[in-house]
Amino acid sequence: MTSYTPAEPLAIEAEGLVKVFGEQRAVDGVSLAVPRGAVYGVLGPNGAGKTTTIRMLATLLRPDGGSARIFGRDVLTEPTAVRSLIGVTGQYASVDEKLTATENLVIFSRLLGLSKSDARRKSAELLEEFGLTEAAAKPLENFSGGMRRRLDLAASLIARPPLLFLDEPTTGLDPRTRSQMWDTIRRLVREGSTVMLTTQYLDEADQLADRIAVIDRGKVIADGTSNELKASVGLSALQLTLTDRDRIDEARILVSEFLSRAEGKIVDATISPEAGRITAPLPDPSITTDILIRLRENDIRVDEINVAKPSLDEVFFALTGHAAEDDTDTEESAA
């Protein structure tokens, strides 16, 4: 008889999670499937239900409905086991401002069961890893926002949990520090961690996430890779900037006729005379070369070409009817 070994459980498997605060359903039937070793982005505006969902998955809030498992462990019946598998980094540094960076990390390490010597060794390693060694003896009240966020992430890694919940970890950071945090997240995943990342920043989800769930008003309204989500709302756009702007009308007609034949229906390219640019919907990026050959055969020179997919901003607006940065009543106020 052939033995059967079941597949490894998902890092996160949630089915129909519900959380109600008074008359507000902050989370309204959220289902998620997060594979191991990936960055899973949860995208949505303030009040969408992102933070409340993470708090339920991390055993910090009890769901009012549905179920969830972390690496196969039930968040309701096995909360202690779940907590041993996760690290949580919130939107605000969970540290004492009057203590130094070293003192904060040592306290966290001791609470996790490390000896005094191991706690100091681990703290020194993390401070070096996150570029905070020179600030190790400074009280946190003298730290910048970026330094506090890095220290908070360092604290969540003391036990090197296999699953990290990062709840808007780069909110309010300058571009350079955000980029550093992105590099850290990528490195953690390369080393085997799974990351669930909530964010309002569409470019952050686009840069980091292997898969993205879009949440709005407590519901998952879309799920897929960045490319899948973009493809779901529209075609790519071809943009051509001409050398000779006087021939832009002639070029527009050629491009429109070519695309119409390729599509089997009328396709109209648009023009921006001031910029000397033509923009047209592109059903298949592979035909771009054929369009360029057709223009060259008519001695129309192209200075610049760009094939642009819909942005995640456009995806979010198409799915929800409003921009990702639009605020509703926040989850925290509901809690």
Image (tube, rainbow, N blue to C red):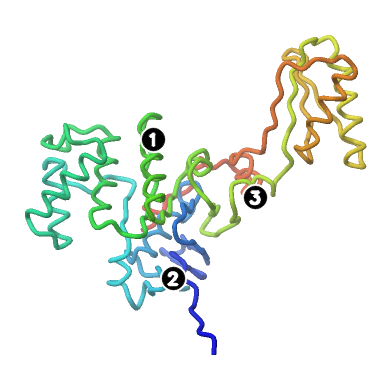
- Residues at marks 3 and 2, CA–CA distance in whole angstroms: 26 Å
For badge 1, the amino acid type reads Arg
- Residues at marks 3 and 1, CA–CA distance in whole angstroms: 25 Å
Q: Give the residue at mark 3.
A: 228
- Residue at left offset 25%, top offset 47%: 154
Q: Nearer the viewer, residue 31 or 37?
A: 37
- Name, please, the residue furthest toward the front: 1
Instruction: State if disc 1 and disc 3 touch (CB < 8 Å).
Output: no
Quarter of the rendering containing residue 83: bottom left
Q: Provide residue 9's location: percent of width, then percent of height.
A: 46, 71
Query: Disc 2 or 1, which lies upstream in sequence?
Result: 2
For badge 2, the amino acid type reads Ala
Q: Give the residue at mark 1.
A: 178
Nearest to viewer (mark 3 / mark 2): 3
Is 33 left, or right, of 156 in this rendering?
right
Instruction: State if disc 1 and disc 2 touch (CB < 8 Å).
Output: no
What element does badge 3 sit on? helix
Q: Give the residue at mark 2.
A: 68
- Residues at marks 2 and 1, CA–CA distance in whole angstroms: 31 Å
